[in-house]
Image (cartoon, rainbow, N blue to C red):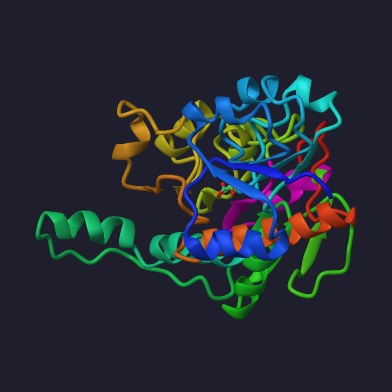
Amino acid sequence: MTATLQIVVLNQLAERHLEMLKNADPNCSIHIAKLENAAPLMAEADILATWGHLDIRQLCAAAPKLKWIHALSAGVEQLTFPELQSSSVILTNSKGIHGIPVSEHVFSMMLAFSRGLNLFIRQQQQSIWKRVPTDEIYEKTIAIVGLGSIGRSIAKRAKGLGMTVLASKQEQTSEIFVDRLYRPDQLHQMLAEADFVVVAVPLTEATKELFTIEEFRIMKKSAYFINIARGSVVNETDLVTALEQGVIKGAGLDVFDHEPLAETSPLWNMTNVIITPHIAALSPYYLDRAVKLFADNLTHFIQGDEMTNLVDKVKGY
Ligand code: OXD
């Protein structure tokens, strides 16, 4: 008889989620814990399901049997530490389940700017009836920096709204919803053409501070910058300068260098900024999709099949 797989999950799961995992492996033992009290469970753990932003180094150091870490998020920024990189533990993530909520979030920000909601909501709070110029996103140009599964969902919706779609990507694939594809080294050329720039790249050594004042200066003065990727993809001080000095028109920001965003950040009070608290991917369906992916991968793991969403621990995606 094979040993029972011990699975530690650093998130609450509903009965239906436990059932999904039990359907994949009726014999497994599932332990739900918080980061701060999971340590005693790690001595026997074979599998750890966690989030990319949690610092699990101490848990891993106490887990001699650990074989697989699964991120319930797409981002794995805290999970690629040197000890894990050099170990045989495999890392998978939840890439592929974010397209619907994140692209809807991106368009809620773009349409809000275009129709002036960033201003009208502030006016409403003060009972002010005042018309301000509004615009359309129809026939505007969107540049999607990073065309993975989230970028593709954004591209598809942008086409549906009559936009011209530009995107940058390492491999030059043929894409039905993209009008022009750029290589990463052609980023500046793409930025210069866009009315909306949407960042959808993973955070890696190569994408850290990809946006500095130089990139904002290349963008049109009338352009909006939307970040649903990671805060550190942008030099936040440069972004503040660009917004204060009118180098770009506005920014929709779901992610920040340090989260939660400090109360003292000048971004809070800018009328040309929309801030959301890193919730672009969240919806009532998130955990159902994430656990389904985890359960499918559990089947692959048990059967020794190729794992879905295997992360290159050195590249970070
Ligand atoms: C993720 C996110 O990485 O929502 O999953 O940011």
Q: Is residue 257 left or right of residue 218?
A: left
Q: Nearer the viewer, residue 243 or 230?
A: 230
Provide residue 137's location: percent of width, then percent of height: 51, 70
Q: Residue at x 53, y 58 (%)?
A: 287
Q: Nearer the viewer, residue 169 or 5?
A: 5
Provide residue 237's location: percent of width, then percent of height: 49, 26
Asked if residue 97 shows in the view, the reply is: no
Asked if residue 175 shows in the view, the reply is: yes
Magenta stretch: includes residue 102: no
Outermost residue, left side: 127
Q: Nearer the viewer, residue 109 or 134?
A: 109
Q: Residue at x 40, y 33 (%)?
A: 260
Magenta stretch: includes residue 196: yes
Provide residue 114's location: percent of width, then percent of height: 42, 65
Q: Is residue 109 left or right of residue 96?
A: left
Up-down relation of residue 166 to residue 225 (above or below): below
The C terminus is located in which quarter? top right
Q: Is residue 299 left or right of residue 130?
A: right
Up-down relation of residue 45 to residue 166 (above or below): above
Up-down relation of residue 141 to residue 204 (above or below): below
Q: Residue at x 61, y 71 (%)?
A: 158
Give, as a single range, the part of the protein colored magenta.
185-202
Provide residue 107's location: percent of width, then percent of height: 50, 65
Q: Is residue 148 left or right of residue 2?
A: left
